[in-house]
Amino acid sequence: MAPAARAEMSETGKLAAAKAGQIMFEHRCRSCHADDPAKQAYGPSLVGVVGRKAAALEGFNYSEALKSSGLVWTEAALKAWMADNTSIMPGTRMRHVGITDAAEQDFILAYLKSLK
């Protein structure tokens, strides 16, 4: 019999995915976003972003489109944003991201979810 598919990744797998995501975050996101709420960056800190309402952190010049969107940063919303933020949110001030590889998105999300 084939082993049952696992719905949850092991803790070791989560750590490995988060580490890979950290490397990708450094390359793709770090130039504008911090992964430490105490550090200043051009864009908002991504600590605690999963589940947070878009444009919720104070001190940033968010576009009217983003402020009035009602968007909540679910995993699906973050993946869509990574893939093509300028199409899903015309008028956003954030430059086009273009992270279309699903595995890369998953690794970055694993890292973002690991941030406390």
Image (cartoon, rainbow, N blue to C red):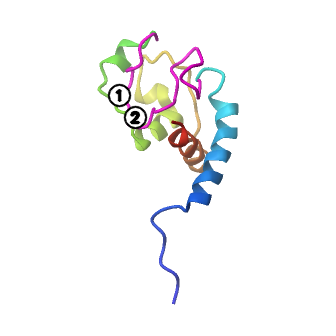
Q: Is residue 21 above or below residue 42?
A: below
Residue placed farthest to the bottom in the image? 1
Q: Residues within 10 Å of mark 1 (few under 14, many from 20)?
A: some
Magenta segment: 34-60
Amino acid type assigned to the residue bearing label 1 in the image: Lys
Residue 72, image x, y percentages: 35, 32
Residues under numbered marks 1 and 2 in contact, where contact means CB atoms less than 8 Å apart:
yes
Q: Which mark is residue 53?
A: 1
Q: Is residue 92 magenta?
A: no
Rendered residue at 48%/25% (across/down)? 86
Q: Is residue 88 above or below residue 108?
A: above
Rendered residue at 47%/78% (across/down)? 4
Q: Which mark is residue 114?
A: none
Q: Viewer-proximal residue, 18 or 55?
A: 18
Query: Based on the displayed image, in which of its 4 quarters is residue 71 positioned?
Result: top left
Residue 16, image x, y percentages: 65, 53
User: Circle 2 is placed at which residue position?
Assistant: 73
Amino acid type assigned to the residue bearing label 2 in the image: Trp
Q: Main secondary structure of the magenta part?
A: loop
Q: Is residue 56 magenta?
A: yes
Residue 50, image x, y percentages: 43, 37
Q: Residues within 10 Å of mark 2 (few under 14, many from 20)?
A: some
The residues bearing labels 1 and 2 have C-alpha atoms spaced at a distance of: 6 Å
Q: Is residue 13 above or below residue 87?
A: below
Rendered residue at 67%/46% (across/down)? 20
